[in-house]
Amino acid sequence: MRDISQKPNTLRTAVAKALIKMSPSTVELIRQNKVPKGDPLIVARVAAVQAAKNTSDIIPFCHPLPISHVNVEFKLDEDAIEIVTTVKAIYKTGVEMEALTAASVAALTIYDMCKMLDDDVLAIEHVRLVNKTGGKSSYQKTLEQPRKAAVFVMSDTVSAGMAEDVSGKLIVERLKNEGFEVVEYAVIPDNESDIVPAIRRCSDDLHLDLVITTGGTGISPRDNTPEAIARILDKTLPGVSEAIRSYGQDRNPFSMLSRATAGIRNQTLIISLPGSSGGVKDSLEVIFPAILHAFRILVGEGHNAREKEYKEAAKK
């Protein structure tokens, strides 16, 4: 089974369809509720809900999911019944298999209840996924234009040559993978007198799009990064640091002690991350790809454009 422990929870939705062909006379019997075994649609709806909730018991590599909604609809045509299943869950992985299983079992249930009436024509034509939303694939947005970034490692020991930087290099690698040009990477002592000028230069002189720092966000006497950054922000983004801490707390009980912050100066997005490599990895999982949307907002593009794209993707 695939390890999904590092993935964040998002609202996942999937819609599947199944089509079962039958003779017109059988469809008419279902309409009139005259099938000897009872109403196939009522039974199929219950079966579909049960199937969605128990998909992981049927398909070996599916994860158990906290399903929050299952909807089953039927469309009766002259010689067929179309089944549409919708499944929702707030979780780390998608619900497309749950929707497909629900549609499949609903079709099989109708088949079982009608086979005595329509042995020659009755057939399940297809079961297919109509669409799915949620997770990174729905929010993934590549950069419309090249973006420039800087990475600063706030560490007295690393700057003094007493330790090797790991966290900063992880950030640099991830930024490059996300399409950023990292124009500056530096290790500096955790002093406000060093931090403030470095970030100001990136924002005011270099006009960079993103600055990410690592380290100096704890509660030791030398952890000064949050105060230094707070001095120069035009706007704070508490939701970014809240999301990072919330995600981290589920994995490390010490995450609550982090004072990492985020905000905007001019049109530069500034985010401070913890100093540990584990904290950096977790934080990067949270902020990407969501923060890419911030660059559109900063230039006044607004939320509506992204919402329109999201809705259009959901229809496909």
Image (spheres, rainbow, N blue to C red):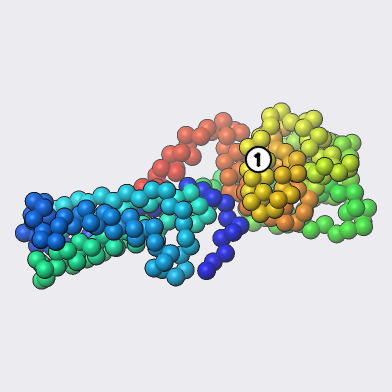
Q: Is residue 153 left or right of residue 313?
A: right
Where is residue 33 shown, x and y percent of the image? 11, 52
Is residue 27 in view?
A: no
Q: Residue at x 57, y 34 (%)?
A: 297
Residue 55 or residue 216, whichever sits in front:
55
Q: Is residue 98 left or right of residue 251?
A: left
Q: Residue at x 92, y 57 (%)?
A: 162
**Identity, as a three-letter code, of the amino acid under mark 1:** Glu
- Compared to 104, does 264 lie above or below? above
Helix, strand or loop under label 1: helix
Toward the front, the furthest residue is 37
Where is residue 62 shown, x and y percent of the image? 46, 65
Which quadrant holds residue 19? bottom left
Toward the top, the furthest residue is 234
Where is residue 258 shown, x and y percent of the image? 75, 44
Which quadrant holds residue 45? bottom left
Where is residue 143 shown, x and y percent of the image? 58, 47
- Compared to 193, does 130 lie above or below? below
Residue 289 or residue 218, whichever sits in front:
218
Q: Residue at x 92, y 56 (%)?
A: 161
Q: How many marks?
A: 1
Which quadrant holds residue 229? top right
Residue 301 or residue 7, whichever sits in front:
7
Q: Which residue is mark 1?
A: 242
Q: Is residue 189 left or right of residue 248?
A: right
- Compared to 166, does 312 lie above or below? above
Q: Residue at x 44, y 44 (%)?
A: 310
Q: Is residue 64 left or right of residue 224?
A: left
Is residue 257 in view?
A: yes
